[in-house]
């Protein structure tokens, strides 16, 4: 953290308290929000990577020398991906 908030810790009875200026409080909130946005971006990046891997796998299946059949080749590739053949040529 670059400009860390200036925090004053003290005890009030049995309770530990912390005091800081209003500017430091807003700065701390903004940093937490940026951290949460970073976490969301990392999660979205993971989902994007997974989707790209699936798309690459489908592309491999489409390009794998599948002989033309009565159905759309993409349909056969997707069927092979989920291991549930839709056309007779893929069943064998």
Image (spheres, helix red, strand yellow):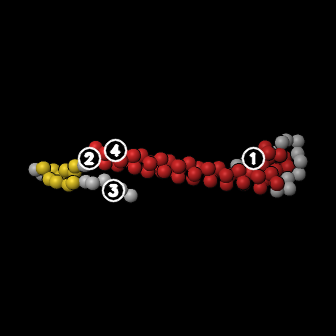
Pick the quarter of the image with the N terminus. bottom left
Residue 86: x %, y % from top left: 79, 44
User: Mark 2 or mark 4, which is nearer the start of the sequence?
Assistant: 2
- Which residue lies most toward the top here? 71
Task: Give the mark, 4 or 1, whose residue is nearer the N terminus.
Answer: 4
Q: Nearer the viewer, mark 3 or mark 1?
A: 3
Check disc 4 and report the residue beneath it. Answer: 26
- Cα distance in 3D space between marks 3 and 4: 12 Å
Q: Residues within 10 Å of mark 3 (few under 14, many from 20)?
A: few
**Disc on the earlier residue, 1 or 2:** 2
For mark 2, give the secondary structure: loop
Looking at marks 2 and 3 on the same chain, the residue that comes earlier in the sequence is marked by: 3
27 on left or right of 70: left
Mark 3, residue position:
4
Q: Is residue 15 left or right of residue 28?
A: left
Q: x and y percent of residue 48 in the render?
A: 61, 50
| Foreground tag (1 vs 2) | 2
Residue underneath mark 1 = 79
Residue under circle 2? 21
């Amino acid at each position: 953290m670059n400009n860390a908030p200036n925090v004053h810790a003290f005890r009030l009875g049995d309770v530990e308290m912390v005091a800081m200026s209003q500017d430091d409080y807003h700065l701390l909130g903004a940093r937490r929000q940026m951290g949460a946005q970073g976490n969301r971006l990392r999660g979205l990046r993971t989902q994007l990577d997974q989707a790209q891997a699936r798309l690459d796998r489908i592309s491999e299946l489409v390009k794998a020398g599948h002989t033309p059949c009565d159905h759309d080749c993409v349909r056969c590739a997707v069927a092979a991906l989920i291991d549930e053949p839709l056309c007779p040529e893929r069943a064998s």
